[in-house]
Amino acid sequence: MEMFQELLNTPVQFFMDYGGPFILVLSVLVFVHEWGHYIVARMCGVKVDSFSIGFGREIFGWTDKKGCRWKFSLIPLGGYVQMFGDSDPASARHEDGVENEKGEKIRPFTEEEKKVAFYTQPVGRRAAIVFAGPAVNYIFAIILLTGLYVTQGQPYMPPVAAGVVEDSAAFDAGIRPGDMIVKVNDREIGSFADLRKNAALNLDQEVTLTLRRALPGTAEAGELAWATETEVLKLTPRLVVETDRFGFRHETGRIGVVSLPNEGQEIREHSLPSAFGAAVKDAYYITIDTLEALSQMILGIRSTDELGGILRIGAYAGDFAQQGLIAFITFAALLSVNLGLINLLPIPILDGGHLAMYAMEKLRGKPLGEQVQEYALRIGLVFLVGIMFFATWNDLVQLKFVDYVKSLIS
């Protein structure tokens, strides 16, 4: 409720704090995604009719020498690349006698037009063009993180238990102050943030911790040193529901260890190759962790209340922007990976859905029937709109907008 009160009291400042950063980061990531489709289409010899940031009516734009219309459109919540011959499964092929939705016969492509049309390309080229969007989102995130790690270093808190909460999972398992956790299950732990993330994902599920004990007396003296041998413990993180400052709820697993104080933070210096390796590793684990959280929601292990929409993204975009440029760039990299991953999900209408259709086409030796493709796309659209509505409703409820509206009525 406080957030909406802030919007009513200072609308211009509110937009600058939250709306501006949200539109900026979303526009950049949409441009990157669509540029991936665009550049690979051009490399494959496909003509591109238009490149739009946003949907709806054009606000302004220009036409390049190749005939592509570059434009900014009214609704800044996405974008698209329109390729020649890419409209719908029927009209795209422009076969003799095919009619469009208005009952008009479609003119067949000339031989020259077939060379530059999207749907007349071999299935491998079409798949490459579609895959390029999500792929470039990943590449962009890796470039951002690599640049940060080379220029700023990689800040991290060592995965050391400065303290252990009594009656916690860690306490019961026998973890002691000064112990360094080096693995959770089979995943290596390089920082306390890694440890927290891995614990958060394991809701009431037993995990195996590999740790190195602090040498006797070093923890008390404040000069930590650790045994070379490792020990293995098993524990089950305890489910905790947290609420952030915006009111969004998060289910997380807690093991009950306390990190070192802020002055214990270290900076890991990187050369260009090591920064690139660290960035690739980060992108990989963001993907794995996101898929794990999604699977937990599907299986009912994790609440779907955590599924957020554009309001949540906007709130976090503004929050990270206020923390500074480095935090905002890190957020952009995280969001770019998630945008690429979501588009790869095998849902009709998303890039992953098209890739699934192309895989079937390759196996069958011919495309799926027009009606099958059309129904699949309609089902995908309904599903996607439903998810967006549900996520936005989650945001409105947790931001207490519904309560705010009720308070105005009552």
Image (cartoon, helix red, strand yellow):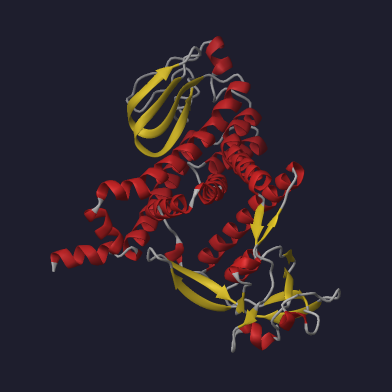
**Whole-percent x, y for residue 392 in the image:** 36, 55
148 up-or-down from 236: above or below: above
Of 6 and 41, nearer the camera is 6
Question: Which residue is rendered at x = 38% and y = 18% of the image?
Answer: 105
Left or right for 110, reference 169: left
Front in this rendered view, residue 134 or 267? 267
* Residue drawn 63% across the image and 72% down it: 260
Would you say 358 lies left or right of 21 here? right
Can residue 144 be spotted in the picture? Answer: yes
Percent coordinates x, y for residue 201 in the rendering: 59, 68
Q: Quadrant of the C terminus?
A: bottom left
Q: Quadrant of residue 230?
A: bottom right
**Depth order, front residue of 35/353:** 35
Q: Residue at x 64, y 80 (%)?
A: 163
Is residue 115 depicted above or below 16 in this figure?
above
Percent x, y for residue 409? 14, 65
Q: Is residue 306 above or below residue 353?
A: below
Q: Quadrant of residue 292?
A: bottom right
Report the residue that reaches farthest toward the right.
228
Is residue 366 visible to us here?
A: no
Count of residue discs: 0
Report x, y in % for residue 343.
53, 44
